[in-house]
Each structure stands twice: as structure tokens, then as C-alpha cells.
Image: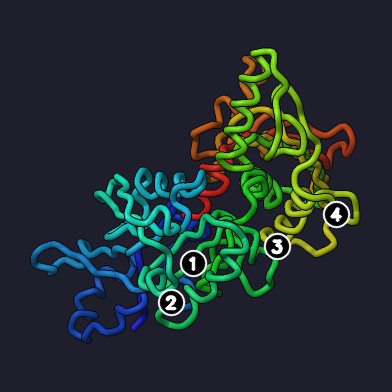
Amino acid sequence: AQTKATTITDRHQHNPRHHHCIPPRSIMKFTSTVLASLAAAAAAFDRASAFAPASFPRSHLHSSASQASASELRMAYTVGIVGATGAVGKEIRSCLEDRGKIPVEKLRIFGSSRSAGKMVDTKYGEVQVEEFDVESARACDVVFLAVSGDFALSHAEAISSGDDGAVVIDNSSAFRYKPEIPLVVPEINGEETKKSKLIANPNCTTAIGLMALWPLIQKFGIKRCIMSTYQAASGAGQPGMDELLSGTADYLAGKTPTNEIFAHPLPFNVIPQIDKFQDNLYTKEEMKVTWETRKICGLADDMPISCSAVRIPTIRAHSEVIIIETEKPVDLDEARAALDDAPGVKLVDDPENLQYPMPLTATGQYDVEVGRLRKSIAFGDHGLEFFVSGDQLLRGAALNAV
């Protein structure tokens, strides 16, 4: 018997490339009689198995009173969030509640000893924060880690190991560059989740840019990519947003803003540095875009991809200018059609009416805005330039993980 599971999709449910599912581990215990009754539902479940992680988590099978109709059967999961009170953790919970793509039977929120015992109101009822421990996390079907890389390195593998471990989706950079760990944008390489129960979520800047870049790579191929990113204060989490707001208030009151989170005061300023400088004089943030784009898109290790990352004084939503040299000549109408048809992408490209992507309009949106499409003067018929804006907390981090 082949285990099947509910498929979690974004858009274009007919296309299995966009599926990203987290199926159960223990349904093999059903008797042959029950399996026979499920035969009618097998076709509906076929697509889900294509992207099933290597080992299945526990789940609970629910049905209506009679269980006679296989079409009424569904799976539900126990989902845990570690770091649920942080900026990304809050958005993960919001995605679970608002999107309804994952049937959650029970939500567990893990925190430190200081937050343990606090009550959190959720769509699934009032949830008491539990002090984190590995065994409690392993009792979940799925665990989202919205914590530091050091925490993930210490605990992620212990949570996911063995047949009885949970599927772990890690939002830190701890495992992104390990060859055996899938680094996933579901719309691009969701099938990679079948290879491991520990799955890495990409850098939010990479995730936003690739939503627009991938359909164009598929359409025209790629020879090189140059990317400039303009990243909001929220890229540094809630402390970054707080520092921008307080610093702006100080500036407007005639005081000198102070900085602890950013390298320099951010209000009314731009800072051409995000993360530490590397030996090649790129910052680590810039190199993340290069490394992760190659891995997620299955590009060669020497594919020329260059990024410059700049911190700007906006609250949320990163923006990016992306320039590509293509293998095939670019047709702008075909490029717009490819983007318009892509899941998770909103084409905003009407210069005549001043319609183009902006952080102001991308904030709070699940889709990434793409516009300002034009042939590149630098690369001629084999070049394309465009502008992207996306809410990196919501789309770039939380929704991609969920």
C-alpha cells in the first residue's frame, strides 16, 4: 500500500510542481479492508506523494460519522512553532491560521523558561506556551524553527532524526548550504522535500527574488544575473523595526538617532552593508543570494550571480532590481505572460499609469510584485531588467516555510 496525504498548494492546484506537502507516517497500520475503502480516493491523493518527505510524520485521520465516503477523509497535524513570539514566528502562525492550507489538529508553541506558561489566543483556541525540549518537539508532526542558527544547529537534527521524529522546517541559515539538506522554494523545487525530514528555508531576499526570476529562467534560460537589493528594517527582525521607528522619532525631534542593530543610524539614510564583509569584499548577505540561487534553481556552481545589498529606512517589504543575460532572445510579451501565469507572483507593470511594485503596496501581501520589465541596454535582445517588491516576513520567510 502506498501512503497518500493532503496536498498543500499555493495556486495552480493542477500543477504538481507547486505542491509542498507534509504527509503522515503511520497510516500503514490500516487493515486491508480500510485500504480498500480508500481506493476511490487514491487518485486525489496521488499528486501529494510526489513531494512526500523521506519519512512520514504522525497524523490523525478524520472523517464524517460513517467514514463510508473516502472523499470525506482528511489528514490533520500537530504543529509546533519554536520562536512563535518573534517577527517571523508570528507570521508563520498567521499563515497557518489565515491560509488554511494545513489542517491543524493541535498547535503547540514552544518558548524559553521565561515565556513558558503564558497563554496565546489562536484560531485553534487558547494555547499555553511550553518550555522547549527536544522530546516534546519530536511529539509533533511538523516543527517550524523561527530561531537562531545556533539553536537550530543544537536541536534541529535531534528533533527530526529517526522514524518517529518530526518534519523540521528551519528558517535560519544553519543548514542551507549542506548538500544533503533540501533548500526549498516550493514553487521551484518542492519535490526536494522528499529527500529529508529536515528542510531549510532560504534567505528571505533570495526567496522573493526567485519567485520572479524562476519563470524567466524557464522561459529564456540564463547566462548571468546581477541583483541589487533594497532591504527593509524588518530584515533585522522586530528589534530592527523598533530601532528605525525610535530613531526616526529622535531625528524629527532634533535629536541624534542612535544605532545598536544597524551599522549606522538608519533613519533618512541608506547603508550599503548587510551582514559581515567576506574576503572577496561582498557581504555575507550578498553571497547568500549567490549561493542559494544556484542551489535552489539547480544552476552550475560557477553561474555568475552578483548581488549588492543595501539597508533602507522602510519598515517592511524588500525590493530588488534584477538584471539577467539570457540564453534565448527576450520577448517582453512572453516575459509578462510567464510572470502573470506564475504562482505567487503579481504582475504590476503599467508605467503609463504609474503602476509598478513598491514596498507600500507589497507589504502584507502573499504575492510578490513584479514590474518595470524592459530589455536591458547592456545585454540587448538577450537581456531583461525588472523590479521586485515582496513582504519578506510574510512571503519571503513565513509563507515559504508553511
| Element class at badge 2 | loop
Mark 1 nearby-residue class (10 Å; few <14, some 14–19, many ≥20): many
Crowding at mark 3 (Cα within 10 Å: few <14, some 14-19, many 20+): some
Quadrant of the image for the N terminus? bottom left
Residue at 49% x, 40% y is: 366
Residue 66 in the image: x percent, y percent? 9, 67
Disc 3 marks a residue whose amino acid type is Lys
Residue 74's spot in the image, x, y percent?
Answer: 26, 63
Residue under pointer 4:
278
Task: Describe the element under mark 4 as helix, strand or loop.
Answer: loop
Question: Would you place residue 272 above or below residue 64 in this image?
Answer: above
State the residue at coordinates (64%, 75%): 180
Q: Is residue 384 left or right of residue 7?
A: right
Instruction: Please tell me whether mark 3 sits on a helix, a strand or a loop.
Output: helix
Counting other residues with Cα less than 10 Å from the Cα at mark 2, is it few (<14), some (14-19), or many (20 or more)? many
Q: Amino acid at mark 2?
A: Gly
Q: Quadrant of residue 271?
A: top right
For mark 3, what is the residue?
Answer: 295
Between the C-alphas of marks 2 and 3, the distance is 26 Å
Name the residue furthest left. 66
Q: Secondary structure at mark 1?
A: strand
Q: Marks 4 and 2: in contact by CB < 8 Å?
A: no
Would you name the residue on which mark 2 appears?
A: 165
Mark 3 and mark 1: span between their CA atoms? 19 Å
Position of residue 242 relative to residue 67, above or below, is: above
Q: Are marks 2 and 1 in contact (CB under 8 Å)?
A: yes
Q: CA distance from mark 2 to mark 1?
A: 9 Å
